[in-house]
Image (cartoon, grey):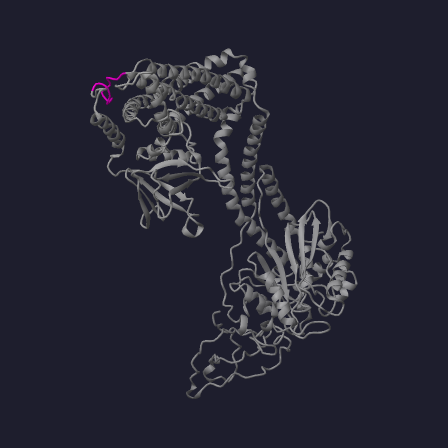
Amino acid sequence: MAGNTGMEQLIPIVNKLQDAFTQLGVHMQLDLPQIAVVGGQSAGKSSVLENFVGRDFLPRGSGIVTRRPLILQLIYHPHEYGEFLHKKGDRYTNFDEIRKEIEADTDRITGNNKGISNLPINLRVYSPNVLNLTLIDLPGLTKVPVGDQPQDIEQQIRNMIMTYISKDSCLILAVSPANSDLANSDALKLSKDADPDGLRTIGVITKLDLMDEGTDARDVLENKLLPLRRGYVGVVNRSQKDIDGKKDIKAAMAAERKFFLAHPAYRHVADRMGTPYLQRVLNQQLTNHIRETLPSLRDKLQKQLLAMEKEVEQYKHFRPDDPSIKTKAMLQMIQQLQNDFERAIEGSGSAAINTNELSGGAKINRLFHERFPYEIVRMEFDEKELRREIAFAIRNIHGIRVGLFTPDMAFDAIVKGQIARLKEPSLKCVDLVVQELTNVVRACTLKMSRYPRLQEETERIITTHIREREQICKESILLMNECELAYMNTNHEDFIGFAKYQYQSSNSSCRSAQQTSETSSKSGRKLGNQVIRKGYMSISNLGFMKGGSRDYWFVLTSESLSWFKDEEERDKKYMLMLDGLKIKDIEQGFMSRRHVFALYNPDQRNVYKDYKELQLGVETQDDMDSWKASFLRAGVYPEKVSDSANGEEGSSEGSTSMDPQLERQVETIRNLVDSYMKIVTKTTRDLVPKSLMHLMINNTKEFINGELLAHLYASGDQSSMMEESPEEARKREEMLRMYHACKEALKIIGDVSMATVTTPMPPPVKDDWLSTGQDSPKIGQSGPPSPGGSMRKPISANVSRAPPPVPGGGRPAPAIPTRPTPAPPTRQGNAGGLPPPLIPSRPVPIVPPRMQDRPQVPQRPH
């Protein structure tokens, strides 16, 4: 494929850019514009398209030849061949066969009696001499249906053409023959509809060699008559006789050049006429498009280059076999690990803050102050079993005797059992802290992934140390529990027991101890009505129609629980007082994704409207633990069997006696145990987190800062430990390759900018002579002066219609605004020698004079 040298010059530029971006792995989207030819039937559209490509492959003939849109995709390829979409896999190296297949496929769809179809033919032409472009050959507009054509043939073809040329990326070649009236040109009307500003439209005048003798299209080609923003280009295509005689495109171009140089009307503009000039115009538009795309490509590359600079700086002088570099890298990574671990625990901030969930020090803080206290409270309350144990203890201590006094040994026995139960939540807290510390270490060592053996060894050493400290922590907590068991400090200032009340206390003194205990238990809620927690929850036991499926905004204070429509807290739905309420877990449903707990009243009274309990659902287990801990602060404790229920145990031997004296003794011991356990629980809640901080968390931090490096040196060969992973080596090579390719692409973009020139968009012209849409002239209606209608007449012919006479008084009629038309030559005999006035009327065809006889007449500005 040859014949378009401008395109051949653009190919290496585009290929250079494409190669540079391919090395970068970046998809370069130049999106070169489509080029569509539009015009009337037999205007020479297919010939113009063939001349641009430089090959003879489209069907020819009289009448309507192009009856389906042909979408021709030019694709750069080392080998030259054609391929149809409807015949995938069949390669056509002979372009005559391509023409025959176009004709055959057209007939298959539309028949052989001039029928049309909007189903396109897709042809791909691969060649080393083309750019990746899309050219569209469209059927010519026709007015009268023939053969199998429908009655609305004109509207169908118009709609088909508008489908393609309305796209902003489509350049429109408006092809009009010179031997017809240009003002009625179908191509110009359609182009004006699709491109009102004329930014994408180039006028092409064909058949200049077929004009009547003595006429020419000079004014049109000079863009003086019926101007377009991008002007007109005249071409002379091969005649049917030339085609039948196998005249090739190169010979046709030489004959075209000879015609323009020999013709007296076109000699002075011959350099701006002909198929080669049209090729240059279109190629310049492709160049303009490429240059417009370059700034955004340059910005993208510069951003990529800056992002790689810092990392590439480390790789530029990197030598994998240099021990000093490996030692330096290990020291830097250990130092980075120390800083990351410190930030994760102490919360001093880092570049990679987790915004999805709690982690590190924040999660450990929640374990200390929410999860651990809640686990303790859950184990503390088992009223039924506790009273049963107290009754058995008192009766077993009295033995066969009838006890007159409340035995202190029963108090010791029950308290020791309760203190021993604190071991489980304390040890569970240790396990949870160890798990979180291990996660923090794993996250911090991820930055060592460049050296997998170093990462693995570092994680192993720190995890082993944490496990050793875990054992020490557990031993310390067990020792603390044993210390509590060893001695009951009943003289503690917060204890309500023996120092203030006698065992021989009367019923009133027992009631006083009980009341004191109850007062002490309730005093925790008297915080003032302060807000404890806010957040979204759903009410799970409400029906769908009552809003149970949606989340509400809950506000928990020390006295009440309120919920609103949203966090703006304007539309309050309800306020529930917390007095007397308890909290319990609800089993998660089979298909439920939410974690549910419930508020209920031990007296079986309704909590909310007609509901005995209020079931609240949250998204995660952490949210549920946090809400439960918040309810503890508000004085709402976990599920606890009521006193009345515990008393109904007549069927259980010895569980509760009907003896009033024993009942008073059980109640006294119960209150004393409750008072003492509050002291022990408070101490445990305080000391367990402190022990974990001292013995595990701070110790691990000191180990990483002070001893980790020594353990790494002692663990084995440092050179093998600092071996790069294959992935990291590939990453380094890829980074360097990308860096150099990016610099090369920027250099190529600079070279392209220097080697090409952008032509500015021509200024707007007065083209309102060309009406659009419903204002388009109808068939048979005359348009403004144009070649064809006026240019077919001989030069000596008189004007067919004289302009209107000047009104009386010798003054010309006032000018009335109308569509501008070129001023006609001055006629002899006009009053005062003035030009005729402009009166809105049907435009008058004008005979252009010979060049040597053309008078100098002032022209009205367009």
Seen in the picture, residue 659 relative to 584 is either above or below; the reply is above
Find residue 453 and report its horizontal and vertical position in percent.
55, 19
Residue 492 shown in magenta: yes
- Above-or-below relation of 779 to 203: below
Residue 830 position in % (x across, y down): 49, 84
Q: Residue furthest bottom?
A: 808
Q: Establish if 563 lies above or below 271.
A: above
Residue 546 spot, x, y in % from top left: 41, 51
Q: Give the side of residue 497 with respect to residue 372, left or right.
A: left
- Rendered location of residue 631, percent (x, y): 34, 35
Can residue 31 be seen here? The reply is yes
Q: Is residue 789 above or below residue 376?
A: below
Q: Going 43% across and 44% down the picture, which residue do you hit?
A: 540
Query: What main secondary structure does the magenta stretch of the protein show?
Result: loop
Does 783 sit left or right of 526 as displayed?
A: right
| Furthest residue in direction top, as rendered | 714
| Span shown in magenta | 489-499
- In this view of the protein, can residue 264 be seen by the observer? no
Of 240 and 588, the residue lying toward us: 588
Question: Residue at position x 51%, y 75% from top?
Answer: 823
Residue placed most toward the observer, 352 or 612: 612
